[in-house]
Image (tube, rainbow, N blue to C red):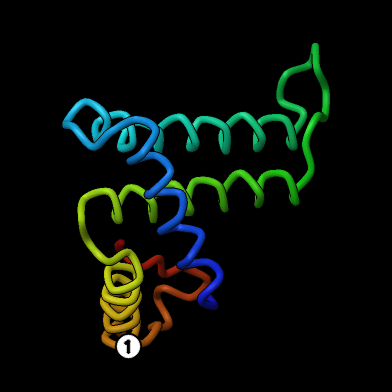
Amino acid sequence: MDETTWQAVRAARGWLDETNGTGEAELTCRMLKLTEEAGEVAAAWIGMLGQNPRKGVTHTREEVAAELADTAFTALVAIESLGLDARAELEACAAKVAGRLDDRPAASGSAAGAVIRPVL
């Protein structure tokens, strides 16, 4: 991610701080906003699959991806709202996952076809 992303994260946090304050209730709302955004991902995915026969297909993969991006951005703003450096936290998380992937056992013949998913 380039500096524009991190500037936008910090600007969004600043705007929320100025508009809504920084008390515990506001921080709680920022954490809960992640659940709201995740719900929008779920709704878009259901819409992409056309799971609701009354509505049919209502979303595209690109719209699902956009909702996922909204969720990721909201998480970064929440991290900054805790007074932490979102970039540093994200980099630490990526390093942790990369380490787990580096340490995973090689696929054996008995597990052929199995999908190895990292534990985040």
- Picture quarter containing residue 119? bottom left
Total tally of numbered discs in the picture: 1
The amino acid type, in three-letter code, at marker 1 is Asp
Horizontal side of residue 45 vs 19, given as left or right? right
Image quarter hosting the C terminus:
bottom left
Most extreme residue toward the left is 24
Which residue: 30% across, 82% down?
104
Q: Position of residue 99 (x, y in %)?
A: 27, 83
Q: Secondary structure at mark 1?
A: helix
Q: Is residue 29 above or below residue 71?
A: above
List the residue tagged with mark 1: 102
Q: Position of residue 53 (x, y in %)?
A: 79, 16
Q: Is residue 21 above or below residue 15?
A: above
Horizontal side of residue 46 vs 82, given as left or right? right
Q: Position of residue 58 (x, y in %)?
A: 80, 29
| Camera-side residue of 93 and 83 | 83
Which residue: 27% across, 30% down?
26
| Camera-side residue of 36 and 25 | 25
Most extreme residue toward the front is 18
Q: Is residue 51 above or below residue 112?
A: above
Which residue: 46% across, 67% down?
6
